[in-house]
Image: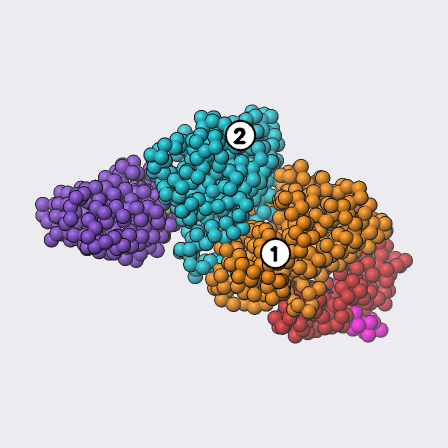
Chain colours: A orange, B cyan, C purple, D red
Amino acid sequence: MQSKKILNEGGDAVDEMLDGILAAHPQHLARADGSARAIVARNGPRPGKVGLVIGGGSGHEPTFVGFVGRGLADAAAIGNVFASPPPDPVLACTQAANGGAGVLYMYGNYAGDVMNFDMAAEMAAMDDIEVRTVRTTDDVASAPRGRRETRRGVAGNFFIFKAAGAACDRMLSLDEVERIARKANDRTFTMGVALAPCSLPQTRRPNFDIGGDEMEIGMGIHGEPGIARGPLKPANAIVDEMLDAILAEMAAAQGDRVAVLVNGLGSTPLMELYIMNRRVRQRLDAAGLAVHATWVGNWCTSLEMAGASVTCMHLDEELTTMLDHPCDCAMFRAG
Amino acid sequence: MQSKKILNEGGDAVDEMLDGILAAHPQHLARADGSARAIVARNGPRPGKVGLVIGGGSGHEPTFVGFVGRGLADAAAIGNVFASPPPDPVLACTQAANGGAGVLYMYGNYAGDVMNFDMAAEMAAMDDIEVRTVRTTDDVASAPRGRRETRRGVAGNFFIFKAAGAACDRMLSLDEVERIARKANDRTFTMGVALAPCSLPQTRRPNFDIGGDEMEIGMGIHGEPGIARGPLKPANAIVDEMLDAILAEMAAAQGDRVAVLVNGLGSTPLMELYIMNRRVRQRLDAAGLAVHATWVGNWCTSLEMAGASVTCMHLDEELTTMLDHPCDCAMFRAG
Amino acid sequence: MATDAAAIRAMFGTIATDVEANKDELCRLDGVIGDADHGIAMSLGFAAARDAAAALPDDAEPTAILNAAAKAFLNAVGASCGPLYATALMRAGAAVKGKTTLEDADVVAMVAAMAAGIRDRGKAELGNKTMYDAWAPAAQAATDAAAAGLAQAMQAAEDAARKGAEATKDMVASKGRAERLGERARGHVDPGAASAVVVIEAMRRALA
Amino acid sequence: MATDAAAIRAMFGTIATDVEANKDELCRLDGVIGDADHGIAMSLGFAAARDAAAALPDDAEPTAILNAAAKAFLNAVGASCGPLYATALMRAGAAVKGKTTLEDADVVAMVAAMAAGIRDRGKAELGNKTMYDAWAPAAQAATDAAAAGLAQAMQAAEDAARKGAEATKDMVASKGRAERLGERARGHVDPGAASAVVVIEAMRRALA
Ligand SMILES: Nc1ncnc2c1ncn2[C@@H]1O[C@H](COP(=O)(O)OP(=O)(O)O)[C@@H](O)[C@H]1O
Ligand SMILES: Nc1ncnc2c1ncn2[C@@H]1O[C@H](COP(=O)(O)OP(=O)(O)O)[C@@H](O)[C@H]1O
Ligand SMILES: [Mg+2]
Ligand SMILES: [Mg+2]
Ligand SMILES: [Mg+2]
Ligand SMILES: [Mg+2]
């Protein structure tokens, strides 16, 4: 039996989705000239501003396309479902985002994205556009602490892109933007759990198997296996497991401030996410940490996967400023 | 096998969810004194303003609690999952929302809500608070056109509440607010389709059965059966069926303006919703209607039900003003 | 056999236990033509009613117990059955106002008052495919058989409720969530009518 | 047997057909240790390569065909296999630059260039549990058997690829999506290595 989806041809899903997005958000978004998969902010790029180009596979909406807008990303390159975009749309984004002050690429640290964005960066260099790259590596479940640079980028993108986008919007230099982006990434920690798989539009078949009473701890946002399989636990126990890992990594001092993201993977209702947030707050209170801001919702999804992640960003004054800086995107507003 | 959910005790789900919501949104929301299930806007109620009280069962988040905030609802009474709140929290909301200019109750037209809100209205009358009631009846699938007043209220709440909340925020009189709320309801039309059931936190069992290749046309947002079962169709065909019904009811003239909501029921990804929006736009363009604004997302959910609805609000100048009026809620911002 | 306050308290215990035992089946019935929560609401409601009744001082009168149960049911539940049973219980309390122990006729009057409360609150008529289709014939049968003693009156009520609930199968709903189903509601028992049978049977066992 | 432009075009047809036939199985393999899309990406990529090759004028040279195929693959796919196969095909094109028909040794050189392209683009080493673990031994085997004629060389390549892919089962990944799985990746064939076997077998059937 095929998974049920509201689709036309599976192979047309990404382009039809983008048509629907552009129809819904004409004030915010446009396609870059000549590129169906390069989505540019109407009010983002401007002379003298560092351009922020993000991107990755489709299926994580509102990540990435929903974070294009003034104060956040200038453009997003859109790949097939769970597949990095090829270099061409990345280059189109780069050209559209270029205000003469250099361009920063930010994306989750996956082999495919690295290869494609690096190829685009080489092409941009031939156009005399200075490109820097900061890959997000917030998924604490995806490699030991000592190999942080090999970790995956997951829902923490939300905070990390936000901080970098604010830095760009405040007209900081490419050096400064890069520094802030790296710091944002270094101080952002995510841990996730999956309960049920999604299925790709083209296969319409569950992309992994999992027992009816199991959960996968640390599963990636494309269904990549995580740390361990185990029996499904109560919400508080799940959050405790996440927070134990996150707090250990974060090593924050009493009184430090954090920002919290409780993120749904697609089919986990807000009810469950807010129940998780209740426990997150109890744990952070107990650890003596102050919560500066909380977001709860489906911000970085895996199509209709069931599950959730918790992200904490360990704030300092600069990151707090960046997080509070206003942004106005098609699917996300702040400040 | 029980459905998988991230919960502690099923019976505690609603109260724990509200704890998590208040922890996440302290700037926007607070509990009314002495009532765990009466959620009030921090910056909403004020002297001389008509109070807007909304409410209904839980499980539809961000409806209702997420629409509490300045410019929209002053308070929401929260029931158990898919169950109307009892009169007590409605009365607590009424007292909190009362600015001396009367209070408007708005909720979906369901037998349980009618009885409980009517009881609360009787109690409010004893407190000398003037209460009016406007029930939403936007679900075109739930009764023939001639019996519009018996229809269910579903995702169209989003527009109808928004319009009424704006009217309150603009300090219009109770008569005017009521008139605008009724007009908003009269001009809002929704049609939905369900692909897969949700399950309640307490039973953790699918709340209806549906074949692996079937969809239910016109299903209610609590899993109430709709108009017909049929084979799952492609996205465009589903939207066409919805738009045929909506356009026939709406009877708009060429050049008229509409607002569009493509709403997910819980586990239908944004990708599919935007693919639907693409077709919605094609159909509205073909009908010669102008789209003033579009929202796409999970605005009125049924826990993790799979499926979606399309709502069109037939705008006039006044409703356009109300829709464009700013609001700042925990889970929804506009303007 | 006179019914005193303790018997009424015990009655809420019996109803709560029986409703709890039927919770899943009532949810299942509600899932077919409604929203699958009727068993949850009924079990929450009568558990709250039982606890509220138990929390009153020993010398509380039947009316006070019924009123406390009504309020507790309502606040624990909301939904449709909340106002309906809260009204039913308040009317039952009003029907026996001032009495410390109830005669058989008072119990029958209580049942009749409950049915009337449901009718008034829900504005339901016979044949609307609601719990009233079980409560109305039950009240009528109890009243008709009152002279034969409480045991027979309550048995008659239970039998009539059961028949009434069964008859909802053939009805098209015109009240409640199933109202919009039209012909598709036919063939399925109304969950509220089914739970009415459980409640009335429990009352019979507890009181008669 | 000389390989001309038409044969190279036909080769893309064969690869596309074979990959398409294995699409579901490749997605399944990728589902176990990756993200379940490898079959989709490969079939999209080679369908695009085939169409791009077919769209060129009849007198296009092998290098032009391979370059067009590389670009089309890359732009249709992205992902990991996009840059890897695009680089492989561009290197294949470079290896036969200037020729209108390819001798057997040119075809072998093409295979070797593809393996080198994958290695360079992916910075993969033998034993990393990637497609390179199939391509590297295939290239080596073809080169070693080149003197025995193209049929034998390509058969040797296919056999070596198959053995190499099979051997990825016992490896822990240190490149690509499976890199973070550690021991949990063991026991599962790398999907990119499995698709390499399909590609190399199709090339043998088309060219040798
Ligand atoms: N207006 C009404 N009058 C009498 N009974 C009603 C009315 N509306 C609903 N009911 C009863 O309530 C039952 C449903 O109760 P419940 O599931 O608790 O509420 P909800 O429909 O709000 O989920 C129906 O099966 C029906 O018997
Ligand atoms: N750095 C690399 N070098 C060589 N091959 C790689 C590398 N990274 C990934 N691969 C190959 O790519 C395959 C996955 O391809 P595909 O599923 O198309 O991409 P993605 O992982 O982006 O979804 C892996 O099975 C592996 O063989
Ligand atoms: Mg992929
Ligand atoms: Mg209900
Ligand atoms: Mg119900
Ligand atoms: Mg893959």
Count of picture labels: 2
Give the image location of residue C6, x and y in percent: 19, 55
Q: Residue at x 43, y 52 (%)?
A: B15
Q: Left or right: B177 with respect to D47? A: left
Give the image location of residue A162, x and y in percent: 67, 50
Q: Label 2 neighbourhood size at 10 Å, few (<14), some (14-19), many (20+)?
A: some
Specify the label residue B86 is tagged with: none
* Mark 1: amino acid: Val
Q: Left or right: A257 with respect to D105? A: left
Helix, strand or loop for disc 1: strand
* Mark 2: amino acid: Arg
Q: Quadrant of residue A254?
A: bottom right
Q: Which residue is mark 2?
A: B170
Q: Label 1 neighbourhood size at 10 Å, few (<14), some (14-19), many (20+)?
A: many
Q: Residue at x 16, y 52 (%)?
A: C4
Q: Which residue is mark 1?
A: A258
Q: Residue furthest front?
A: A255
The answer to whether residue C138 is above or below residue D97 is above
The answer to whether residue D11 is above or below residue B66 is below
Q: Nearer the viewer, residue A322 or A285?
A: A285
Q: Main secondary structure of the magenta part?
A: helix
Q: Is residue A70 magenta?
A: no
Q: Residue at x 80, y 64 (%)?
A: D120
Helix, strand or loop for disc 2: loop
Give the image location of residue D41, x and y in percent: 68, 56
Give the image location of residue A218, x and y in percent: 59, 64
Query: What stretch of residues is rendered in magenta?
Result: D138-149
